[in-house]
Amino acid sequence: MNARMPNPVTVLPGAMQPLMKILEVAKQGGVPETTLELVHLRVSQVNGCSACVDGGSRTARKSGESEERLWAVTAWRETPYFTDAERAALALAESATRLADRPDAVPDQVWDEAARHYDERGLAALVLMIGATNLFNRLNASTRQIAGAWG
């Protein structure tokens, strides 16, 4: 397996700092870091981005996430390991990633459940994490970045 090209953020290095800044700012919204890491992992799974699934799993473990929950995140609806707030964040992540799956990309029911658990800053943090992860997934998938290649 070979990448099509180096990661675009290494070809145009001025791109990496602003992208990393978005992730840094998202962590200031009051959402637990482990929840943001679960969101990153789930979005990356939905998009089939092996590099971000690999890297996201590693980062989540460093943030204190358990192996059990990491293995179960693909089936979060059917497992008892997640809180109602985490489930709301994961549902929001899936809807905001699968924009073309329904006429109303993020249905009110999904948004309202997230808003029940997170204030405006928390919602902003989640939406920023979801958007940034989708961007990273698209960069990596388009150029076929290799899982584990970034360390």
Image (spheres, rainbow, N blue to C red):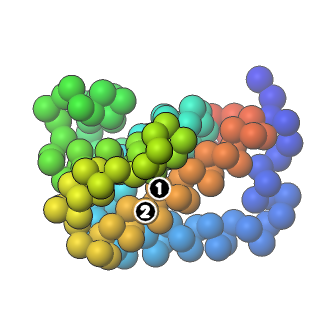
Q: Can residue 35 be seen in this view?
A: no
Which structural element holds mark 1? helix
36 is higher (above) or lower (below) than 51: below
Mark 2: amino acid? Val
Q: Where is residue 132 in the image (x, y as percent from the top left)?
A: 55, 59
CB-based contact (under 8 Å), mark 1 and mark 2: yes
Which structural element holds mark 2? helix
The answer to which quarter of the image holds residue 49 is top right
Tell me if mark 2 has few (under 14), some (14-19) or many (20+) residues whose alpha carbon lies within 10 angstroms of its own.
some
14 is higher (above) or lower (below) than 131: below
Q: Position of residue 150 (x, y in %)?
A: 65, 46
Q: Mark 1 points at which residue?
A: 130
Mark 1: amino acid? Ile
Q: Residue furthest front?
A: 103
Q: The C terminus is located in which quarter?
A: top right
Alpha carbon separation for disc pair 1 and 2: 5 Å
x 81%, y 29%: residue: 2
Tell me if mark 1 has few (under 14), some (14-19) or many (20+) residues whose alpha carbon lies within 10 angstroms of its own.
many
Q: Mark 2 points at which residue?
A: 127
x 19%, y 41%: residue: 82
Q: Foreground residue, 99 or 25?
A: 99
x 79%, y 54%: residue: 8
Q: Is residue 95 visible?
A: yes
Q: The N terminus is located in which quarter?
A: top right
Q: Foreground residue, 26 or 109?
A: 109
Q: Where is residue 138 in the image (x, y as percent from the top left)?
A: 67, 46
Numbered disc total: 2
